Image: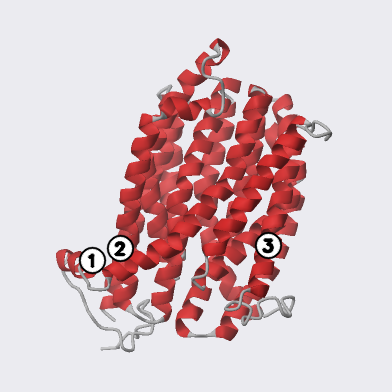
Amino acid sequence: MTRVSAEARGCPNAEGMHDTVRSPKTFFMKTLSAASTQAEIKSLLTLAIPLVSAQISQAATGFVDTVMMGHLGREALGAGGLASFTFQVFLNVLAGVVMGVSPLVAAGFGAGQRTRIEQVTQQGLLLTLGLAACTMVGMSHLDVVMLGLGQAPHTVALATSYLNVVLWGLFPAVGFALLRGVVSGLSQARPIMTIVAGGTLFNIAGNYILGFGKLGAPRLELAGLALASALAWWGMFLALVIYLLRHPQLKVYRLFQKWYRLRLPLLRELIVIGTPIGVSILLEYGLVLVMGYLIGLLGTDALAAHQIALQTGLMVFMIPLGMSFATTALVGQWFGRQDRQGLRRAGLISIVTTIGVTAVVAIALLLFRQPIIGLYIDISDPENAALVELVSPLIVVVAVGYIFDGVQKTTLGALYGIQDTRVPVLLNLLSYLGVGLISGYALGFGAGLGAQGLWIGYYLGATMAAIAYSWRFVTKLRQFDSC
């Protein structure tokens, strides 16, 4: 009989790794009852709280833009919200590709490989520059695409006025995501919260001044909101660069020295890990973007209602997203140390914690629907009555589906921590396109549920993804146990 190597079976270097767990009951109870569970929870919260706070502050950029758009009128809210989310899709997909640095840096940190950490970061910067430059060229021609998708010319004109300005913030936004992954992998995420909070405050002030023409500035409306966002991204990126150069524990890593030197094998490794992450984000966010364009065919009110539900969902989604980044870093560090029990414990505790947190947030969304809608529009205005009636059931759908969306994201973060990125892409494809898009279209247009049906379809896809990723994570852990 030919013996199959551990590497061929998808195992990490198994030297020194023991503690095989057989039955499902023993698998979970042994992991969660370990003496170090309390310390793992503390590590998770220490890393997750600043990352979650930073994600919420970062999402507040789009949230504030949307609120300001609402005060510019329903047409500006619909068109500007569509443009803002289109930019967010490009940003998140590129950030996903460069996010391959996070598990690599975390593993290098766990293994004490300083040179590898430096080189991974440098190649990530090169990759960021190339991706951003190519994408900016494509974004400058999106008006043709929008018109081809049947959007009203006036909607396209408003959306283009936003996109043509905000695209100049793409490079610093992706660069910030790259460096955030580096500091997360090095367990130094606390300053991210401060930097992003400062950028958010700047963006709010800039929106008010440039969007509405205050303090002597011209009234630029959507273009002004876009300019404020782009400037905020540049400020956050440069602030994080300065922090990395000056922090006593981080400046020993020569992250920016000869960053332009091309190392093809390492760049290829980064692309191999990061591209599936970017594709997964494209499928997930792309489904929401397709929903937006489909809902745009239903009229201005439907599109405005969708944007309110979308920005609300994005804001609360930042909580499990930040936790997933923390999960990737912690699991990746245990993976770098070749500690099977540690990575199992880190992953499962993160998932259980996410379920508890998202359940609390979901209840809050259900209880405070009207005040939430009131942030965007004047709910006492009779002219907005139809819009309020469209938004309210969408918030209910967001609240119910939020828990499953949170579980899929954190579990996916755990898979990224063990550098498992290829199979999750296939699971993502089946979940969001095979289930989410088809069921959403059937419910929205076939069953006549409109925007609500499309949103239900999206969360059916997220639920399928949560089940599939959980199965994959447990399967990988058992695979490690058999090594």
Mark 3 or mark 2, which is nearer to you? 3
Residues 50 and 11: in front is: 50
User: Is tag 2's residue or tag 1's residue first in the polypeptide sequence?
Assistant: 1
Residue 388 percent coordinates (x, y): 49, 20
Residues 362 and 406: in front is: 362
Are the residues at dot 3 and dot 1 in contact (C-beta closer than 8 Å)?
Answer: no
Dot 2, how many residues are within 10 Å of its Cα: few (below 14), some (14-19), or many (20+)? many
Amino acid tagged 3: Ala
Are the residues at dot 2 and dot 1 in contact (C-beta closer than 8 Å)?
Answer: yes
Residue 409 percent coordinates (x, y): 42, 54
Task: Tell whether 133 sits left or right of 27.
Answer: right
Residue 326 percent coordinates (x, y): 44, 63
Q: Label 3: which residue?
A: 239
Q: Quadrant of the C terminus?
A: bottom left
Does residue 331 appear in the picture of this structure? yes
Dot 1, how many residues are within 10 Å of its Cα: few (below 14), some (14-19), or many (20+)? some
**Element under disc 1:** helix
Task: Tell whether 465 sits left or right of 389.
Answer: left
Q: Label 1: which residue?
A: 32
